[in-house]
Amino acid sequence: MKFTKDDFGDDFSWGVSTAAYQIEGAYQTDGKGLSIWDTFSNGAGKIDDKSNANVGCNHYEHYKEDVSIMNKLNIPNYRMSFAWSRILPNGIGQANQKGMDFYDRLIDECLEKGITPWVTLYHWDLPQVLEDKGGWTNRDVLSWFEEYTVHCVRGFGDRIKNWMVLNEPMVFTGAGYFLGYHAPGRRGMGNFIPAMHHATLAQSLGGRLIRHELPEAKIGTTFSCSHIDPRSEDKKDIQAAKRIDALLNRLYIEPAIGLGYPVEDLPIANRVEDYLKPDDEANMPFDFDFIGIQNYTREVVKHAWFVPYLQAQLVKAEDRDVKNMTTMGWEVYPKSIYNMLKKYNEYGKIKEFIITENGAAFEDEVIDGKVADQDRVKYLQSYLYEVLRAKKKGINVTGYFLWTLMDNFEWAEGYTQKFGIVHTDIETQKRIIKDSGYWYSRFLKSSIVHHMVEELV
């Protein structure tokens, strides 16, 4: 079939997303404090390729070039994040003026180029000094986050109209405080449950603070999600899939919309009672203007009696003989994004959806100064078709932000995974727009997309 940008409507928001830690570099420049990712990535054996983002894409110095690239590609909206430890090197207290100045310059550069900045307050980079005090397991994180949020909204709210509170709380608490393969590298249920609860409270707290300071702001928060299928029709596999769905897809969004934690399908969530204060359940919801959906793939789940707490295990795509996979080992499954929009829409409590991340890592090669990443182009086309299908079904999805602008430090995978529509040479800092970037640019000028969905499903 064929579709154009215009099929999504004139008021649909198109853009790209990045995260401060992944692109900024300058990790100790101009008074910036260390974050948990600075500490974690410089620790022995933490990152797949033994790399770090101390310099990375050096967006701190190359921001004008990067904004110019977005302008060249006709990208009208830019989702970025603030680095908490660049603004507050000590986590709390006096703001670092040079850090504030950098974001002033970046915001103003975007606006001068006709690009609207959208900001995520917390994209995983907690100041290390706060982690030393317990981080997200310490309830004081709520007052720390409140102070940081107020600095941001008062410093930049005159120009930033679109805000997101947290990025993927399930990932930064699950991978960082339970499994330990993301910063800060903690493990166990005793770390995960308090971190989970405090993140849940922080997302609504952040929303209320922004609303108080900026009554006209558009406020959201973002959730990672994957469509879940059981491996078989066996009752144990079906129940295992329900538990994983509750963990990955429902644990944070349901408290935000007033449904509380999904304890019926995820019994381990009952452990939160040890950390509940009298007003917590009343304070968990917030009337967000939009919910950010971040979807890349689906997951297939089987019963696994030996897995503690969940008795469930993901079945890797490679073990299912999946033909189309990304280099992350994720199945290319476009219907996942439609299914998740449909699932969340059935709550009947969410005003508006924005796809705040969607993209893919593939083996990209620079040949004669070009990157012909047609697999990424097909991926983006197929997922966009499913977003359009959801919109035509009446789901109020109003924006799409591609992940990501440029190849960068991909967390525990280091520089081994390439998600960008712009190639970044970390050694020379040379940027090369990939074929996918040129495709997105043409699409944003309403060029027709030729889409054969059967190629990828």
Image (cartoon, helix red, strand yellow):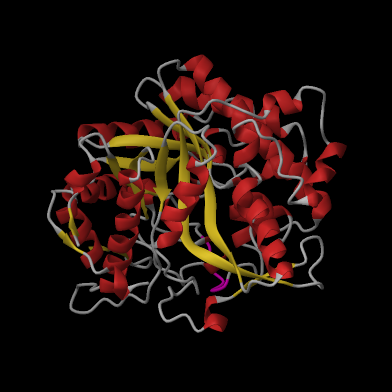
Residue 184 visible to an observer of this rendering: no
- Measuring 57% from the left and 83% from the top, which residue is drawn there? 319
Q: 265 or 192: nearer the eye?
A: 265
> Is residue 313 among the parts visible in the rendering?
yes
- Residue at the spot x=12%, y=54% of the render? 447
Quarter of the figure with residue 370: bottom left
Q: Residue 111, image x and y in percent?
A: 25, 32
Magenta stretch: helix, strand or loop mostly: loop
Q: Quadrant of residue 141?
A: top right
> Residues in magenta?
48-52
**Horizontal relation, residue 21 to residue 244: left or right:** left
Compared to 45, does 386 lie above or below?
above
Q: In which quarter of the image is the C terminus?
A: bottom left
- Please report the residue visible at 80 percent of the width from the left and 51 percent of the height from the top: 268
Residue 50 part of the magenta-drawn span? yes
In front of the other: 387 or 51: 387
Placement of the N terminus among the 4 image quadrants: bottom left
Give the image location of residue 363, x and y in percent: 37, 77
Residue 114, given in percent of the width and then of the height, sits at 20, 35
- For residue 442, which quarter of the picture? bottom left
Q: Is residue 378 left or right of residue 215?
A: left
Does the segment drawn in magenta span residue 295? Answer: no
